[in-house]
Amino acid sequence: MIHLIKNNIYKILLGTFISLVCLFLLLKIVDSFDKTLESLTSISIFYLVIGFLIYFLSLFLRTYRWKILLKKNVGTIKFKSLLNVVISGYMFNNLLPARLGELARIYHLSLLKKINKSFVLGSILAERVTDVIVLMLFLLIGLIFIPSEFTENFSSNLNITPQIVYISLIILLSLTTIFILIILSGLWKEITHKFLQLLKKINSKFNPDKYIESFTEGAFSISNKKFIKVVVIATSLWAVEFSMFYLIGTQFNFDIENLFIAILFFGIFSNLGGIIPSTSGGWGPFEVIGTIVLTSFGVDSNEAAAFTILVHLILWLPISIVGLITFIIDFRKSKS
């Protein structure tokens, strides 16, 4: 693990810098940090527990999706065992920088079963692809109901023109549509093959051997038959997670008419913000993006920041504790 951290030291430093900048921006956005803390600590423990249980349900769905993607290569594995691996993967992502938790997830699975690690890594990429597709579909639906003042407020918060916001959204949705069509048509196989051959021409030492082939097989394990099923599961798990956001949101004094749409856009953009390099757990970009989105809907900045921080804690703290326990148990079993 130390070796992996050394190899990713520049990503870690960049992520740390971005997180610090984001946290600085968050302090500039809120009117009073004392009011933010007051709102943060006013929520009942009961709703926090319910919120975590709802989020835990989404992890069941994530596990089911991964099981489908792994079935062809990994074979039979107990659902409970795979759930433990998924949970520990999120724990490691929460505690390790540069999303090293994805590699830790592969290591945890290898403790339980003999696997093709390249294929498993590819299947994790396939998960992320379906996540982005579903978030873009949610975004498309949300745009139908979005209030006109949101775009003006959002562009103003980012110091850009509304036209840039519209163009960016069109580009995102267009790329998502093209990618879906590529998967459904089967063109990905030809595109992948040509890309690997191009790399071989550029670097004669590069050889698309069985490891690369296994990775691409895992990455595109969403066949035509699986695609609809996997996307339905991904849609369900994100709907469950967003329902947790909505439940917690009802406990804050947001005082806006479009709470559902505001929470939907919060969930979409704050999660897409995970693409931005940051420290372990995504602290910084998640808070800034989430707060900007909510204030663009008219939510008070203190309430928005408090909500964003609290939701992130629900996503981060309990699963880190549970994940650490499950990993230690499986690690000890593998060594006994």
Image (tube, grey):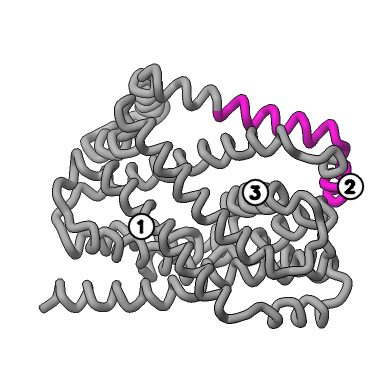
Q: Residues within 10 Å of mark 1 (few under 14, many from 20)?
A: some
Q: Residue visible at 29% across and 57% down? A: 106
Kindly indicate the quadrant of the structure image that contains residue 114. bottom left
Q: Amino acid at mark 3?
A: Leu
Q: Earlier in the sequence, mark 3 or mark 2?
A: 2
User: Nearer the viewer's eye, disc 1 or disc 2?
Assistant: 1
**Three-letter amino acid code at the position of disc 2:** Ser
The CA span between labels 3 and 1 is 21 Å
Q: How far across and down, in percent of the image, does residue 323 sit?
A: 37, 72
Residue at 62% x, 29% y is 173
Kindly state the secondary structure of the residue where label 2 is placed.
helix
- Helix, strand or loop for the magenta stretch, by majority: helix
Residue 276 relative to residue 158: left or right: left
Residue labelled with disc 1: 60
Q: Is residue 158 above or below residue 49?
A: above
Q: Amino acid at mark 1?
A: Phe
Q: Which residue is painted at 60% across and 60% down in the image? A: 245
Q: Are marks 1 and 2 in contact (CB under 8 Å)?
A: no
- Name the mark on residue 264: 3
- The percent position of residue 187, horizontal first and vertical second, equals 39, 18
> Mark 3 or 2, which is nearer the eye?
3
CB-based contact (under 8 Å), mark 3 and mark 1 = no
Residue 173 forms part of the magenta stretch:
yes
Mark drawn on residue 248:
none
Is 250 located above or below residue 336 in the figure?
Answer: above
Find residue 156 and name its label.
Answer: 2
Query: Where are the magenta residues, as a range?
Result: 152-176
